[in-house]
């Protein structure tokens, strides 16, 4: 069982690749697993992490060149080396020194090289997902609607003479909205912070709708500290107002609620607006549909799947003329998801 634990921890050591303290820890772990004199982890440029002392006269560079040329296990006593194949491509090699040059021991080296390659593949996948999520967040930050900005400023200006106190409050709300939307603190925020941004945005919209917009917000206290991707809930609320309620005559209602469901945090945004065809909702989440309507929802859906996995995308319940309900379900805790 100790060996299994060491193998599992290997993935944690290599979560940032071969270089740095993680690579050195992985080399030490591999040395213990193989009971070897020394272990070298190399990328295509040469040794990246080492543990133990290589036998005098060992020409690691020559061994690496041979492994890279052949692309298979090389036994050259007292060394044995196995290539690291990441997603089918040569990425480096595992070199081991000691009493490991027999057939069985060499197979162990090859097996561990496969584990190292898998860990590196997972690390690259995580980094790629992080880059995608960061790019999507930058896109969303850049998509604050000029239409909303113009309307918000017009509403504030209209209240300056008739209700100066409310105009000052709305101006403060507007500044808070911009501060939060353009924040560069990190990729994650608490539910409480996102809720505050939502309430600020809805106050501006209530003033614009001449208070024809009714708002209900119910959030269970236990989920307020939960960290979620930045700007996840707010774009859904904005979409509900802009594409659900703006097109509806008379009064409109939007409800935002959140609660715990076992290990999950559930947030629901529901409006009684014009709704849409279910086929259009599916098209929007797939990245199609009208660009102005779908960019925000598709962006949020993609970021949720990137951070949490494919089972954690948005759920949209809607029908033409029957409003729209959007549900977000995410784990209350996810390693690496921490609000700054």
Image: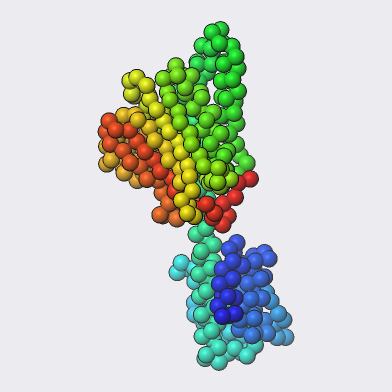
In the rendered image, residue 310, in percent from the top left (x then y), is placed at 41, 54
Question: Is 223 above or below relative to 178?
Answer: below
Pick whichever, 48 or 134, lies toward us: 134
Q: Does residue 97 show up? A: no
Q: Does residue 175 show up? A: yes
Image check: 289 left or right of 135? Answer: left
* Residue lying furthest bottom: 102
Using the rendered view, name the quadrant where residue 2 is placed: bottom right
Residue at 64% from the left image edge and 68% from the top image edge = 23
Scheme of image coloration? rainbow
In the rendered image, residue 52, in percent from the top left (x then y), is placed at 71, 80
The quarter of the picture where the N terminus appears is: bottom right
Question: Is 22 above or below relative to 263?
Answer: below
Q: How many marks?
A: 0
Residue at 60% from the left image edge and 61% from the top image edge = 16
Image check: 132 left or right of 2? Answer: left
């Amino acid at each position: 069982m100790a060996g299994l634990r060491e193998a599992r921890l290997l993935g944690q050591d290599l979560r940032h690749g071969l270089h740095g303290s993680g690579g050195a820890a992985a080399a030490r772990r591999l040395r213990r697993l193989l009971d070897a004199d020394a272990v070298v982890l190399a990328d295509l440029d040469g040794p990246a992490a080492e543990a133990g002392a290589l036998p005098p006269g060992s020409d690691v560079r020559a061994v690496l060149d041979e492994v890279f040329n052949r692309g298979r296990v090389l036994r050259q006593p007292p060394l044995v080396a196995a290539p690291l194949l990441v997603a089918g491509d040569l990425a480096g090699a595992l070199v081991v020194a000691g009493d490991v040059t027999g057939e069985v021991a060499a197979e162990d080296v090859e097996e561990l090289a496969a584990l190292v390659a898998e860990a590196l593949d997972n690390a690259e996948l995580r980094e790629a997902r992080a880059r995608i999520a960061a790019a999507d967040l930058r896109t969303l930050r850049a998509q604050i609607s000029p239409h909303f900005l113009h309307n918000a400023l017009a509403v504030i200006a209209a209240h300056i003479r008739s209700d100066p106190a409310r105009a000052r409050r709305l101006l403060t709300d507007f500044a808070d909205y911009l501060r939060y939307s353009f924040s560069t603190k990190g990729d994650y925020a608490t539910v409480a912070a996102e809720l505050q941004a939502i309430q600020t945005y809805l106050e501006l919209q209530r003033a614009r709708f001449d208070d024809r917009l009714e708002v209900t917000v119910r959030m269970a206290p236990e989920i307020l500290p939960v960290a979620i991707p930045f700007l996840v809930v707010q774009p859904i609320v904005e979409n509900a107002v802009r594409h659900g309620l703006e097109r509806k005559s008379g009064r409109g209602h939007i409800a935002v609620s959140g609660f715990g469901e076992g290990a999950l945090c559930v947030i629901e945004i529901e409006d009684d607006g014009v709704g849409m065809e279910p086929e259009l909702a599916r098209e929007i989440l797939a990245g199609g549909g009208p660009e102005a309507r779908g960019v925000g929802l598709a962006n949020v859906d993609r970021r949720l799947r990137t951070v949490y996995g494919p089972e954690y995308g948005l759920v949209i319940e809607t029908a033409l003329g029957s409003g729209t309900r959007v549900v977000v379900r995410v784990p209350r805790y996810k390693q690496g998801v921490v609000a700054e």
